[in-house]
Image (tube, rainbow, N blue to C red):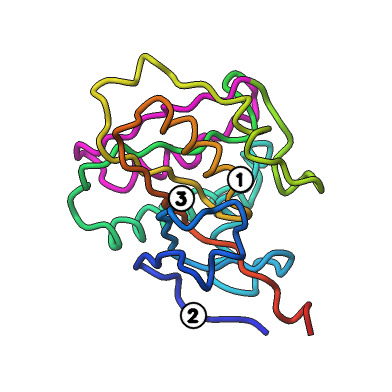
Amino acid sequence: MTSDVAFPDRLTEIDELTRPDHYWLTDDDRCYFLGEYTARKGYSYSRTNQLILNFKKPLDRQGKPEWPYKQSALRQAAAAFRRALGEDPPAYVFVPVPPSKARGNPLHDDRVTRMLRAIWPGQSADVRELIVQLESTDATHENPLRPKPAQIQAAYQIDESLATPEPRTIAVVDDLLTTGAHFRAASTVLAARFPAAQIIGLFIARRVPDTEALL
């Protein structure tokens, strides 16, 4: 079954019905998403699948005919967040979840950072790469063994050069919410460094179970 529904432009909160799909999240976590992505269904299954798969195109596809689709997906996600969050940036510190490849790796893809900076161009949105990943890892979708939060957290470090002014509300931002392990790792590191800050999660999409595969 293919969905032709347009990509959403409003945020939906993870609640008691959807939280079990993301088993590292706790009842206290406040996480919000725009669209719903179904794994292993390909580009044509839904607008969200198309956007996420294009958004995640690796940097080794740069210069290939499909590369403009990545740039288009970045702009589309930024526009959807602007519609959902408002024409003026809220008083959040937006912290992107680090990509799987560390800084300095030729495949380091700061797509979430670039998307965040495109939401309110020319305005004073506070986007900070506060979390640095110290070593490269396999992308989660390339690894059959899903990492646990503690494993992810062990590779994270706060960039102290960006720690001031101290944030009051932190929005941890990622493209896709799957198990919730990366959000759990990021929010734990940030909460340890900024214990007074409120932390929420913002995602372009959440992964939903493939109900057809369960039939």
Q: Look at discs 2 and 1 and give the one toward the viewer.
A: 1
Residue 74: numbered disc: 3
Give how far across and how far down residue 91 sits, in percent.
21, 42
Element at label 2: loop
Residue 50 falls in image quadrant: bottom right
Q: Are marks 2 and 1 in contact (CB under 8 Å)?
A: no
Q: Amino acid at mark 1?
A: Ala
Residue numbers of the magenta segment: 105-134
Q: Is residue 106 magenta?
A: yes
Decide which of tag 3 and tag 1 comes sooner along the chain.
3
According to the picture, the residue beneath numbered tag 1 turns out to be 181
Element at label 1: helix
Give how far across and how far down residue 8 sits, in percent.
41, 70
Q: CA distance from mark 2 to mark 3?
A: 19 Å
Give how far across and how far down residue 119 sits, in percent.
31, 48
Of 40 and 177, which appears nearest the observer? 177
Q: Is residue 157 magenta?
A: no
Of 201 and 55, which appears nearest the observer? 201
Q: Tell whether 201 sits left or right of 89.
A: right
Q: Tell whether 47 sits left or right of 198.
A: right
User: Which residue is drawn at the image coordinates 22% and 58% (left, top)?
Assistant: 86
Give how far across and how far down residue 179 sits, in percent.
63, 54
Q: CA distance from mark 3 to mark 1?
A: 23 Å
Q: Amino acid at mark 3?
A: Leu
Is the C terminus in the top left, top right, bottom left or bottom right quadrant? bottom right
